Image: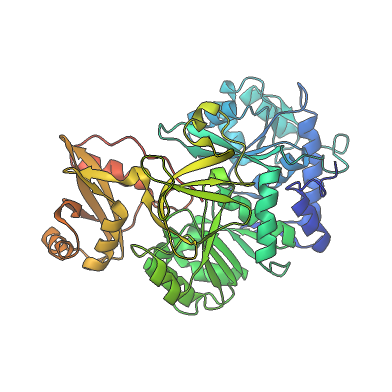
Amino acid sequence: MNSMASGALHARFLRGLEKSPDGVAVRVGEDTVDYTTAHETALAWAGALLAAPGGPPGAIGILTGRGTTAYLAILASLYAGLPAVPMPADFPPGKIVSMLDAARVSALVVDEEGAALLAGGLGGELGELPVLAPHLGAAGARELAGASGLPVLVAGAGTALAEPRSVTPEDVAYILFTSGSTGRPKGVRLTHGNTAHYFALMDAWYDFTADDVFSQAAGLNWDSAVSDLWCAWAAGAPLVSVPPHAYRDLPGFVEAHGITVWFSAPSVISLSRRTGRLVPGSMPSLRWTYFGGEALQFDDTDAWQRAAPGSAVINVYGPTEMTITTHRHRWSPEESTRLGVNGVVPLGLLHDGHGELLLDERGAEAESEGELWLSGPQLSAGYLDPEDGRGKYLERDGARWYRTGDRVRRLAGSELVYLGRMDSQVQVQGYRVELAEVEHAMRGACPVSGAVVVGVPVANSTELVAFYLGEEHPPREFHRELAAVLPPQLIPRHYHRLDEFPLNTNKKTDRLALTALAAERHGAPAPAPVPAHAA
């Protein structure tokens, strides 16, 4: 089957190759790779991986930092017709081993960082797993083989593919890991059919061209990075990796690289506002901005829009299990603030071709408010371990659904607004508390520039602990202001000012870290981790 006809994800790169054969495909710092070089390199690496000892591998692990090797390895995996399994080299070794085992990875691509891990002891836990280390010459490959005990592959003209292998819509393109409630990584299988539907919508909605410049803020193991990568490559445009130091002056980074398309978690906005660099008109090159993965606040959105007056600002929503995003809402100062709840921008309208259900606590269908269930062509093939999908992937009314765990409200016109996680509600003195409501009240109370409220178990009840950014305020001041807008059970017991909120690798606020900090400070054991929710 022809890759283009089958809707193969890597066909999007071939489209970009036709448009921009000499253009930059990816830029990481000072390193760039053009489309033609990337294509030829991916064919060579794909051939070497398919020729690995023991027969063609079942999935390709990509153990790297954020260099160009990671991007080329993803392309090579798909050219080989095999799932790409990105995993950052700074993950704990035990987590890396569990991910490799769960995904049944039978060949590995590494860069300098990945190779150092293998040589430093990780290789001894991987049996006879073949490794492709393209940055090494023959002598370096022999040295790595000796240090790691693993066979090291060599890419060359003799094994290079003449063209990418064909795939079917049911074949898996990516395996992305999301943490479960136990902390054990859960692998989500995204098929070529899943991604074909998502990107067909993106192509229809947005006018990306080879003249655009895409940012790539998220780690490659996150689904938002899948969107960045393949939107850029289908347009024949450059993709620019955003390094950590860029957030010290994000407008300066955007200007230096001429970035026109931005996609990140909303926490990036408050981070940029605190640097003092996010001022009106500071990002004139932006045309399209997408935020997803956590609640997008009115004030932050307004600040970004003023900094990028020529950009549409889109709030997107969707769990990894539904292939990147399923809803979108375009920011409008008047309409978005009228529709939003708790100072949060609406999630928006459902993508074409999908279904959504709102279910109440009894499992009955609700008209306007409940837990969101989703179905449709972007519904992933499920987790690697079927047991992980128990209670999440469900049959109802003759269709297969994914239970998101998010509580939403349906407005007139069918737009959804986010109310919070089903498991983020806590009981305080028998009163059900929605943490998002408390956080919204805090942002307007003193005010503060950011607030996160968590619950920690104390004796037979729960106490609310608030963390905030901005000027220091005495607890009695918070209590006085909040008492005017909240019932007593919703007023936090403890308040802690921070210089900044901890962020995870995808620049989302790390609520688990704050919950653990609250429990540590107030002598209570940390509650079981809440499942991470990704866009």
Residue 409, x across and y down, in percent: 41, 56
> Residue 327 lies in what quarter of the image?
bottom right
**Closer to the camera, 164 or 143?**
164
Q: Relative to residue 6, is residue 233 depicted above or below?
A: below
Tell whether 313 sits left or right of 134: left
Residue drawn at x 49%, y 70% is 331
Tell whether 16 sits left or right of 64: right
Q: Is residue 263 visible?
A: yes
Q: Relative to residue 282, is residue 480 depicted above or below?
A: above
> Residue 227 lies in what quarter of the image?
bottom right
Q: Relative to residue 49, is residue 78 depicted above or below?
A: below
Tell whether 134 sits left or right of 359: right
Residue drawn at x 52%, y 78% is 309
Residue 382, x across and y down, in percent: 58, 35
Tell whether 442 sits left or right of 363: left
Q: How many marks?
A: 0
**Closer to the camera, 497 or 247?**
497
Residue 472, x across and y down, in percent: 20, 63
On-image quarter of the N terminus: top right
Residue drawn at x 43%, y 53% is 367
Q: Is residue 119 visible?
A: no
Residue drawn at x 44%, y 70% is 336
Residue 42, x across and y down, in percent: 77, 44
Q: Relative to residue 395, is residue 273 depicted above or below?
A: below
